[in-house]
């Protein structure tokens, strides 16, 4: 799910930049910035969930290796 969150945040960032460049409606700009900012805690939550899932899997499956690289 992390790539979807990053993709969504990137889309909101691109939309915000485009709206700034073309002097778009301020309501749309606020929506784009809000989407980007709301995505940050969601991304952090997903990253923590994935890390905990890897650790739980390592405890229940002895062949599974946990690395700190990713």
Image (cartoon, grey):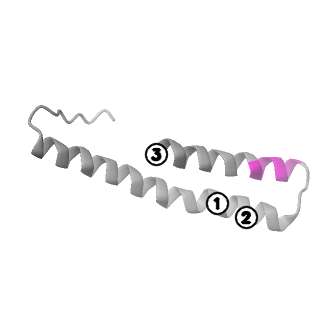
Say whether disc 3 or disc 1 marks the residue closer to the N-terminus: 3
Q: Are marks 2 and 1 in contact (CB under 8 Å)?
A: yes
Q: Is residue 13 left or right of residue 63?
A: right
Q: Quadrant of residue 58?
A: top left
Is the C terminus in the top left, top right, bottom left or bottom right quadrant? top left
Task: State the residue position of label 3.
Answer: 2
Say whether disc 3 or disc 2 marks the residue closer to the N-terminus: 3
Provide residue 40's location: percent of width, then percent of height.
52, 56
Provide residue 48's location: percent of width, then percent of height.
34, 53
Q: Main secondary structure of the magenta part?
A: helix
Q: Quadrant of residue 29?
A: bottom right
Task: State the residue position of label 1.
Answer: 35
Q: CA distance from mark 3 to mark 2?
A: 22 Å
The circle drawn on residue 31 is 2
Range drawn in magenta? 15-21
SS at circle 3: helix
Residue placed furthest toward the front: 61
Density class for disc 3 (Cα within 10 Å; few <14, some 14-19, many ≥20) is some
The relative height of residue 16 versus residue 30 in the rendered view (above or below) is above
The relative height of residue 40 versus residue 65 in the rendered view (above or below) is below
SS at circle 2: helix
């Amino acid at each position: 799910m992390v790539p979807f969150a990053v993709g969504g945040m990137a889309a909101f960032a691109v939309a915000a930049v485009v709206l700034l460049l073309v002097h778009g409606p301020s309501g749309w700009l606020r929506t784009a910035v809000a989407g980007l900012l709301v995505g940050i805690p969601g991304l952090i939550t997903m990253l923590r969930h994935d890390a905990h899932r890897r650790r739980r899997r390592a405890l229940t499956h002895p062949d599974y290796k946990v690395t700190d690289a990713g």
